[in-house]
Image: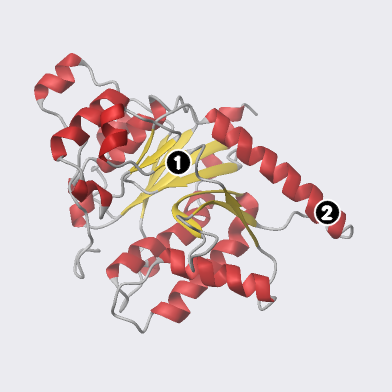
Amino acid sequence: IALDDKRMILTVSLGKEAAKRPLVERAYRSARGPGQFKGYFGVVTDAPENRYAKLQENDDRIYIFQVKEEDVLKDIHPKLAVQYFKTLLLKYVSEVPELDSVEYFNYIDFDIVIGENIDGFDAMILEKRIQSQKEYFAAHPEATKDIPTIYFFEEIDGATKKEPFHAGQFSFDRNSEHCFRLWGKEIIECFLPHKYTLSDQIAIARVGRALDAGNVTGCKLVTTPRDRYILFPFMKEIESRVTKTFIHITNTFRAAMIPEQAQVEYFADILNLTAEERASGESFYAKRVQPLADDLT
């Protein structure tokens, strides 16, 4: 099986406001452009079925996964209801036989842009996966299957913070399902009664602490240093056109601190928009997207 048939990038776009924005298009175009990614690209969404039809017209490797009503959490903060779908990615992929060849996945929040060839990052994750497998089988010679694992970037000051895992991007494979079950269970059981904003990062941090304490087993969470592969730019990086494999401006926070025109020009350069596209006024800048309480279908 060719490498491109084994890889998939996934994102989640939920809510009426998100469907109005060009963030999925931006993420997709960055994957195919500067990311030089030729594998599959998938979007989990509750948008109308024709919302991303234009993307699919010229690319038979795009899959749109329509959200199922039974998977939408009720009586929970809408931000968490959206983030919960990160834990259901394998469920949706596994229901499409055409994707059976896919083994390796990268999840990206839909406000992430891929700024450089993704092959180097994937090779690094594969190295980590091989090393992790060696260590696990050496410690568990009776095992016939590798331990389910998810690979995260370290969060800012992750070693000293209560949230060591950056949940905006993570890598996993077909064997990671148990980790997602633990993550989803933590969101549902711990956060369902609360009405205020919590996060998927707090939930996965709780899973990590439970694993460290031996309260739950059968999952491994691996962190990767951020410096080489992911950028959280401020104005000086925007002006200098700094790029890395993943560029996360964070539409709900950092983007509000950077002038709109600076972002428009930055993304136009990264995505290599044509003169015609630039002249048309088409912009891949998107203002803050925050789901509202009644925003999910």
Secondary element at image label 1: strand
Label 1 near label 2: C-beta < 8 Å?
no
Where is 170 relative to 161, above or below?
Answer: above
Q: Residue at x 64, y 55 (%)?
A: 149
Q: Nearer the viewer, residue 32 or 165?
A: 165
For residue 230, the mark is 1
Where is 176 relative to 1, above or below?
Answer: below
Q: Residue at x 24, y 21 (%)?
A: 273
Determine whether, in the image, residue 84 is placed left or right of residue 53. Answer: right
Quadrant for residue 128, please give it: top right
Of badges 2 and 1, nearer the viewer stands 1
Q: Nearer the viewer, residue 262 or 84?
A: 262
Secondary element at image label 2: helix
> Is any atom of residue 271 visible in this view?
no
Q: Which residue is under mark 2?
A: 137
Tell me the quadrant of the picture where the C terminus can be found. Answer: bottom left
Q: Nearer the viewer, residue 196 or 254?
A: 254
For residue 288, the mark is none
Q: Which label's residue is closer to the chain start, 2 or 1? A: 2
- Mark 2 neighbour density, 10 Å: few (under 14) some (14–19) many (20 or more): some
Q: Residue furthest bottom?
A: 193
- Mark 1 neighbour density, 10 Å: few (under 14) some (14–19) many (20 or more): many
In percent of width and height, residue 232 lies at: 37, 44
Determine whether, in the image, residue 4 is placed left or right of residue 130. Answer: left
In percent of width and height, residue 132 lies at: 73, 49
Q: Gap in Å between the C-alphas at discs 2 and 1?
A: 30 Å
Where is 182 relative to 167, above or below?
Answer: below
Q: Residue at x 42, y 42 (%)?
A: 42
> Is any atom of residue 162 visible in this view?
yes
* Amino acid on which disc 1 is placed: Ile
Tell me the quadrant of the picture where the N terminus can be found. Answer: top right
